[in-house]
Image (tube, rainbow, N blue to C red):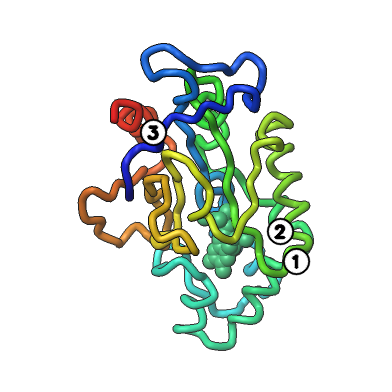
Amino acid sequence: MSGPRPARLSMQQRPPGRAVGGAMGWGAALRVLADMDGVLADFEAGVLRAFLARFPGEPRAGLAGRRGWLPKEQHQAKIPLCHAKIVSVYESPGFFLGLDPIPGAIEAMKEMIQMKDTEVFICTSPLRKYEPCIPEKYKWVEKHLGPEFVDRLILTRDKTIVSADLLFDDKDTIQGVEPNPSWEHILFTCCHNKHLELKPPHRRLQSWADDWRAILESKRRK
Ligand SMILES: Cc1cn([C@H]2C[C@H](O)[C@@H](COP(=O)(O)O)O2)c(=O)[nH]c1=O
Ligand SMILES: [Mg+2]
């Protein structure tokens, strides 16, 4: 985690009506990234639901017993034969588009984007097998959040190179080519990370019912 980013002066690039100024100075809007799977879209529940529908009677690990980010690793460790089947589930057409929103996520994002001096983006990593994952991610955002957020969708397999103040993400370790990302990673609680004990100054958001507004405000004050 590093300190706040220097103020940006690219006012021309800002959408009309979102110019910022005042106490924080011109261009010093707070920039927030929200991860998609596990933060906005319920990837874990979607995997389990689709797996049960497609392979009824197949042994699987339930959400309560999940440890570690990769369900394929989880299942691989306990039930070796499941791996390829789990991958086939989340690589199937309709999987990403059919994911349910995480409770409160849509409301939080729509409120956040209206906040003064705040820039909100969705930052998601597509599967290496990028079809149909990528078009379905765009469609999901349009369906649940609307066209305003389609313009704010960042797809990258390396989030460390994206410049922002905050990143809400369920993955416990986010690594890439940039060793010191500009954002503070707020771990969004999910079945696979809830057992992890975070050492200060690392912070969590337990759910969208938790005080995400306070996290944004704490970052503005810095
Ligand atoms: C195995 C596995 C894969 N994913 C996938 C789903 C997405 O394509 C990315 C993560 O996307 P995010 O929006 O950056 O969260 O990886 C996953 O999320 N979880 C898994 O266990
Ligand atoms: Mg995620």
Visible residue check, residue 120: yes
Q: Which mark is residue 188?
A: none
Where in the figure is residue 66, as x and y percent of width and height? 42, 67
Q: Amino acid at mark 2?
A: Phe
Q: CA distance from mark 3 to mark 1?
A: 33 Å
Q: Residue furthest bottom?
A: 80
Q: Quadrant of residue 78?
A: bottom left
Determine the secondary structure under disc 3.
helix
Q: Nearer the viewer, mark 3 or mark 1?
A: 3
| Residue at 59% over, 22% down | 11
Vertically, is 22 above or below 36? above
Q: Earlier in the sequence, mark 2 or mark 3?
A: 2
Q: What is the crowding at mark 3: few (fewer than 14 residues within 10 Å), some, or many (at least 20)?
A: some
Residue named by callout 1: 92
Where in the figure is residue 211, as x and y percent of width and height? 35, 32
Q: Which mark is residue 212?
A: 3
